[in-house]
Amino acid sequence: MTKYALVTGAGQGIGYGIAKRLTEDGFHVYVTDYSAKLADEAAARLGGTALRLDVSDSESVAAAAEQVPELDALVNSAGIYPWLGFSEISVEDFDKLFHVNVLGPILTTNAFAPILAAGGGGAIVNITSMSQDHASPGVSAYSASKAAAHGVTKLAALEYADRGIRVNSVAPGTIQTEGMQNALADGESPRDSALIPLGRAGAPADIASAVSFLVGPDSAYITGQSLTVDGGYTAALFNFYRAANYGSATASTEALGQR
């Protein structure tokens, strides 16, 4: 029996990695993206179905839902990542960010949950961020939006449990994607890599593996939870901040055992 999954923001980056993994897992994937061109290209590579979808627009979401008769898994991966400090946030920036990163998962969950329920239930996974639980200077509005999305995950898990729908989130750490490479001049932040106990930035496939687990049968009794996939970064933050008090980047690195 064919399984069906829909992944938002699947034209590139983490979303594409997730769509690729779910295809390998045997799902027929609805590959959706704000860019119709990216959705078409990704779907062609994966053998999926392309849909143009603006998650922040209720009419766009409703139109997409009408084209999906069956669904077993929904992955909300679409998101934006503006580099804005706390004092730099404008009302327009805030509205756009929260419409995509918070309202988006709410709209898609409410639109596609009835389809999941009609098939006996299923799984929803929201892609949040490790910054949902840790302040991140320079991306304060983004951190706030992901904290809100984490709250949405828990609330939706409670709202939809009686329909057989599990809702969880995956919180990525530093992941090498097109967006991250554009944001960092040299493609990867040496500072971040030095602070990751596993010694490297993550790849979309690392996040896709977590999603694969959360939409699969082995996670049948898991809902309302967040799985952080960050190579140990957040677990090591205390040691970094303690070492940083001595004003030495070398000390900070050594505190994590990274030589």
Image (tube, rainbow, N blue to C red):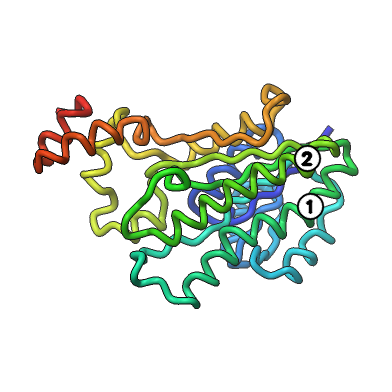
Please identify, in this view, whether the residue under mark 1 or under mark 2 is nearer the observer. 1
Q: What element does badge 1 sit on? A: helix
The residue shown at (10%, 43%) is 247
Instruction: Give the quarter of the image for residue 214.
Output: top right
> Which of 254/85 is in front?
85
Q: Residues within 10 Å of mark 2 (few under 14, many from 20)?
A: many
Say which residue label 1 marks: 112
Q: What element does badge 2 sit on? A: loop
All told, the count of numbered labels is: 2
The residue shown at (65%, 63%) is 55
Q: Residues within 10 Å of mark 1 (few under 14, many from 20)?
A: many
Residue 15: horizontal and vertical position, in percent?
55, 49
For residue 72, which numbered disc appears in the image? 2
From the image, which quarter does the N terminus lie in?
A: top right
Apparent side of residue 115 relative to residue 188 in the rendered image (left or right): right
> Which of 97/200 is in front?
97
Residue situated furthest top in the rendering: 218
Looking at the picture, does residue 225 appear above or below residue 33? above
The residue shown at (31%, 31%) is 236
Residue 164: horizontal and vertical position, in percent?
82, 35
Instruction: Give the quarter of the image for residue 117.
Output: top right
Amino acid type at mark 1: Phe
Q: Earlier in the sequence, mark 1 or mark 2?
A: 2
Give the CA distance from mark 1 to mark 2.
10 Å
For residue 246, which numbered disc appears in the image? none
